[in-house]
Amino acid sequence: MNYKQTAEEVLQYIGGEENISHLEHCSTRLRFTLKDNSKVNMSQLEKVDGVMGVRQNVQCQVIIGNDVVEVYDEVKALLGDNVSNTEEAPKQKQKLGSVLLDFIISIFQPLIPAIAGGGVLKSLLLLASILGLISDQSQTYQILNLVGGAPLYFLPILVAMTTANKLKVNQLVAVSAVGALILPEMTAMLAEGATFLSFGLDNIAYASQVFPAILTVLFYAQLEKWFTKVSPKPIRIFFVPMMSLLITVPIALLLLGPLGYNVGTAFSSIIVSLYNQFGWVATGVLAAVLPLMVVTGMHKAMIPYAVSSMSELGAELLYLPASLAHNISEAGACFAVSIKTKDKKLKSTAVSAGISALFGITEPALYGVTILHKRVLYAVMFSSLIGGAFAGIVALQAFALVGPGIASITMFADKADPMNLVWAFAVSGISFVVAFAAALVLYKDKEVVNEVETKMETAVVSDAVLSSPVNGKVISLSEVKDTVFSSGMVGDGVAIIPEEGILVAPEDGEITMVFETKHAIGLKTANGAELLFHIGIDTVQLEGKGFEAFVRSGEKVAKGQKLIAFDIDLIKEAGFDPTVICVVTNKDNYTIRSFNLEKLVTNDSDLLAISPIA
């Protein structure tokens, strides 16, 4: 891969450097916060050499895989200081949940490398001590143990930096405000019962705390912006930070610190209570749904809990054990596919992705193998359920916040319970074997077909040749702004940007389903293909308003018969995308070819050829 060329093309297709307001990366993805998401050319971005996939929600996530650091460095070199210095464009209207998720990811994602590195170092030391390679009473051990514990101890400082960076305020002053809370002298005073202006201060050790730091920086950000507006420019350089610190730190000690501490304690207590209530079932179910959570980015919502649990309890007993079962399951399934498939490209991808998954990096496996093949996804989810449930039964605990895998297996080392590490190996073995066996049985090769425009005469007698169900412009599924459809998880097909609000039957068949809100309908053709027509993105929230159905489930329909009428203007005014998705849901049994991509079509235009696989 030419890293510089990849970086240049990625920047080009996300709307140029002027469209970027924030950039970071995780273990496999470039994460862009953009000023205008509509400027992203999804179809071209996914074709860039080195790009494994693109996911767009609160952030534009460009999946690179194991070369993400090298591509990130090239992107940063091309951007220079433009991202941090560029003024913000008018913000797009976003839902509160999207804004909150973006805020959480931006704060917690950058913390992972430091916390993971320190945690693994401590776990390796602990394992060496258990094996008798080094005494835990030696100064060498104690010094290295302090090194490993430093990221967690100074977690408030790290959180202050990432929060200030997200809020675009002075990082050093924000760190100073939070740093005052963890000064040794301050900690000693609080322990002895300190007061401020006759108000008593709670005895809280703020080292390793997350939420007090976040609340403190949020408050400081408002003060900084206000004092910057009102202070005379000649004295602004010292007056703004002085006044901000003078007010922020006392308020943090009196109100924000105790509030944040109680929030963190309650957060961890709720998770532990749920775990105690549902036990192994919770771990098993979480492990089973992790493939879907990772694909949609929702697994990031677990990071604040995991960080809080580590700082509060010193261990984590739900998310990381479930992740171990899922990660190793991905590896087992990929190796099974590599053995069974005859597709040389898929074989190579599966081997590489399987190795990455063994080491705790699952995106290459998910986007390169699992999500593209429904049967493999079923195998991974089943194996994750079994492995996760076993982890819950044995009460497996993790002691380092890092992606669980073979290389980081020492994160489960526990001197108080040596069996914890043994159970971690057992979970890994069960997950690998079950996934390997399940994928070996379930996976079947399908003919690799490129989407090409060709004459209808190439279709054989058993083909179902579908006409377009609506008038409009045909686009690739990858351009649909819904990862459930664009990833191919639901099925293979195309989408149409409608110009007229009428959906007709593209072929003779039987109606299998009419959704109660009338925004989706199922049709089964004569050759057994099961079609799903989904009108709009998230239009289920309209609860049927603007939709009218003319058929019922079980009814036989003829090609060209009117099925649903929908109000395009009403859908747009409600803030939803009216794109119509047309997919074959039982895609593993058919070869599917598309026609007229990027062209305007009518109900008389050919759209898909669906041929049963012999």
Image (cartoon, rainbow, N blue to C red):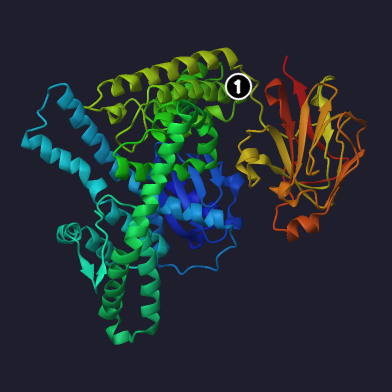
Disc 1 packing (10 Å; few <14; some 14–19; many ≥20):
some
Residue at numbered disc 1: 375
Query: Would residue 236 appear left or right of 555 to someone viewing this image?
Result: left
**Considering depth in this image, is 568 or 412 the residue closer to the camera?**
412
Task: Give the answer, above or below, for where 116 lies relative to 373.
Answer: below
- The N terminus, quarter of image: top left
> For the residue marked with disc 1, what is the amino acid?
Arg
Pick the quarter of the image with the C terminus.
Answer: top right
Q: For this view, does 267 lie left or right of residue 523?
A: left
Mark 1 residue element = helix
Residue at left offset 58%, top offset 56%: 37
115, above or below 614, in the image: below
Q: Position of residue 558 (x, y in %)?
A: 93, 32
Indicate the position of residue 226 as horizontal and vertical percent values.
40, 78
- Relative to residue 50, is residue 419 depicted above or below? above
Image coordinates for residue 297, horizontal then vertical, percent: 51, 43
Residue at the image position 72 percent from the left and 39 percent from the top: 494
| Image height of 165 relative to 542, above or below | below
Q: Quadrant of residue 165?
A: bottom left
Pick the front one: 241 or 42: 241
Residue 74 seen in the figure:
no
At horizontal 20% and vertical 26% (from top left) the residue drawn is: 127
Q: Residue at x 22, y 57 (%)?
A: 182
The number of numbered discs placed on residues in the rendered structure image is 1
Residue 75 visible somewhere in the drawing: yes
Residue 39: image location, x then y, percent: 59, 57
